Image (spheres, rainbow, N blue to C red):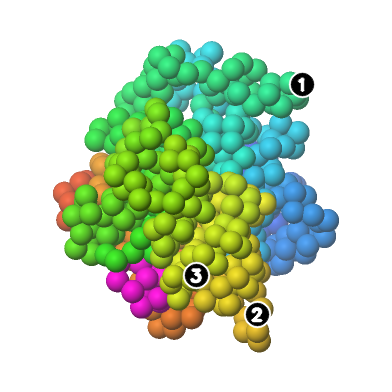
Amino acid sequence: MNKQHINFKHDQSGSIKSVSTDLHGEDIIHNPLLNKGTAFTKKERALFGLDCYLPERIETLDEQATRAYRQLQEKDNDIQKYIYLNQLHDTNVTLFYALASRNIEEVFPLIYTPTVGAAVEQYSHIMRRPQGIYLSYNHQDKIDEIFSEYNADEIDFIIVTDGEAVLGIGDQGVGGMEISIGKLMVYIACAGINPARVLPIQLDVGTNNERLLKDEEYLGWRHKRLEGEKYDSFIDRFVKNVQKHFPKIYLHWEDFGRGNARRILEKYRQEMCTFNDDMQGTGIVAAANVIAGVNAAGGKLKEQKIIMFGAGTAGCGIADQICDVLESAGLTQEQARRQIYLVDRFGMVTDYLKDVPSFQLPYLKSKDVVASWEVAKVENISLAEVVKNIQPTILIGVSTVKGAFSKEIVQEMAGHVKHPIIMPLSNPNSLSEATPEDLIKWTDGNAIIAAGSPYSPVKYKGKTYRISQGNNMFIFPGLGLGTIAVQANRMTNNMIRAACIKLSEFSPSRKDKKAPLLPPVSQVTEVSAAVAIAVAEQAIKDGVAEKKGDLTRLINQAKWTSTYYNYTKSE
């Protein structure tokens, strides 16, 4: 029996048919994974001693969801709605996901981007109850003891953060846990990852955010963020204990800083099944958008010239995945890298710059490349100068520099390519490089756009343009489900490529070149299911799957749905 006191029983198809528990009375009502509230049946009320703890009337899940939706609508603003939804999740997990799945397009922006960014910043002031595990550097000697309380066979998935690089708002310390919780909600709602088999973890290594350090209500370790050997030793201790206690785990890294994210992933990815969504997930979605956008524009992948504005964890992750796509189109790795130009905080990445991070080096341009360019300072080549000199076909932003894609830059780009592909992916919207409305106006409706957060449709010259949200929710849920279903012991590059190609196949622009690059959010569960199958198949081909056989059954065994299962007493 795991710490949640839940056992799942499956039918011949692999789907969950019932749940057994050893809890009784109030304890079962107070367990959010088991609580049905007013929907407990007469039989269950008698079996678990619930008659005196519930109103007389027995409701259906649909009736409960209708009431919950009405209560949600009564909240005055998005933060209040966020708090309400999380309180519902803390009380009744099944009802929460039933509400979310019935109202995906309305609820997702509340539980995930963009609202979650504001919630993270206010974490210590709006915190309701702790969830998951908080591993402080001060208590690292207890990691082994804490993990030993869990049954390894009953945990499939760990999502971990140190809160250093949250969305576009930076170091949020212990508040990063809110992102991990929100991300888990998306995994569960979109792909059916079982909420009883997941474990969110916050690594509290301090914070460099002065606002938090001065906040008397800050809930984390009030200490400057650890660096160097102490940080690395703590991370290694954490990973070694994960490997010891959860040898079959799928480990998801979330919101680690640019100086740590890539090297941590590279250090451990050959030892276990691990994934960094900020690098790989963002890269997959952006590359899928590139494939769809080039198809819509009527071009060829190998002829594209791409500018990546923002060259940290996300930017270089996107560059790597686009490079992979260009290689699949027939270019060598060297040729593919030549097509991608990085522009970071100190200008374009060239060998004029000092102390270039190792993860940017593959895309560094030599002095010879820019020798004939017209620029003010070769040591600091601006985005506008790069656009003017290389005449790009694709412009992608993950810089969090609001308004960086100016009218001048966009129209310079549009002057050389009929359908410029422009992706301001920074989120929340307040940090976006450009608004879709401006991009459409500045290019007379010719720009092919994907944004990082939700935007309302844009009306221009009698036409309505639905804006694609290039959100990672289209990829990481299905990637996770497919990986867990076959119990992959590694995350291979081929699995990531399979997910990217499958997502691109859902682009509406394949049939209508003027349609958005990605499907609407309402299709995210369908996309996730297809991605899961593609990833699982590729894991088997790559020889990293511990489980093989009927994929439908394997995926059903890994899935959970927001329905009230029949409850029985544990034997």
The residue segment tinted magenta is 291-301
Say which amino acid is labelled 3: Ala
Q: Position of residue 269 (x, y in %)?
A: 29, 36
- What kind of secondary structure does the magenta stretch mostly adopt? helix
Badge 1 marks a residue whose secondary structure is loop
10 Å crowding of disc 1: few (<14), some (14-19), many (20+):
few
Q: Is residue 267 above or below residue 312?
A: above
Q: Nearer the viewer, mark 2 or mark 3?
A: 3
Q: Is residue 230 above or below residue 537?
A: above
Say which amino acid is labelled 1: Glu
Q: CA distance from mark 2 to mark 1?
A: 49 Å
Q: Which residue is mark 3?
A: 414
- Of 161 and 191, which appears nearest the observer? 161
**Mark closer to the chain start, 3 or 1:** 1
- Of 458 and 347, which appears nearest the observer? 347
- Of 288 and 234, which appears nearest the observer? 288
**Mark closer to the chain start, 2 or 3:** 3
Q: Position of residue 288 (x, y in %)?
A: 38, 63
Which of the 4 image quarters holds residue 296? Answer: bottom left
